[in-house]
Image (tube, rainbow, N blue to C red):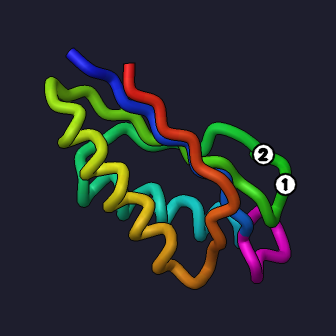
Amino acid sequence: MLIGSLQMELHLHSSQSLKEKRFVVKSLISKIRNKFNVSVAEVDFLDKWQRTCIGVAIVSNSKRLIDSVFNEVIGIIEKDMRVQLIDKIIEVL
C-alpha cells in the first residue's frame, strides 16, 4: 500500500477578501474531489486572502497511478486563470 500526498501553494490574483478566496478555493476543491475521488482540503494560510495551500491525498498500490493523478491535478490548477501555482511538494510513502 502506498500513500501519496500533494501540497500546492497558490496565489489568488484577484481575491480582495476571504469570502472571494473561499469561493475560488471551494470551487477548486470540489472540481478535484469530483474528478479524481481523492481527499482534498485547504491546509494552510486560512486567514490570508490572496494565498492558500491545498493538500491532496490518495491511497493506491501503484506509484504510477499516484503520479498520474497528481500530474492531472497540477494540470487543472495550472490551467485555472484565477490562481498561480507557487510551489508544490509531492511525497509517496
In the displayed structure, does residue 60 sit left or right of residue 9? left
Q: Which residue is mark 2?
A: 45
18 is within the stretch colored magenta: yes
Q: Please give the residue where the numbered disc 1 appears in the rendered image.
A: 48
Query: Of the residues shown, which amino acid type is indicated by label 2?
Result: Phe
Q: CB under 8 Å between callouts 1 and 2? A: yes
Q: Position of residue 41 (x, y in %)?
A: 52, 42
Task: Please state, as top left, top right, bottom left or bottom right, where the N terminus lies in the image.
Answer: top left
Where is residue 38? Give x, y as percent: 30, 42
Q: Is residue 17 above or below residue 64?
A: below
Residue displayed at 49% across by 67% down:
77
Q: Amino acid at mark 1?
A: Lys
- In x, y percent, where is residue 18? 78, 62
Secondary structure under badge 1? loop
Residue at left offset 83%, top offset 69%: 17
Point out the stretch of residues depicted in magenta: 12-19
Nearest the viewer among 90 and 8 is 90
Kind of element beneath mark 2: loop
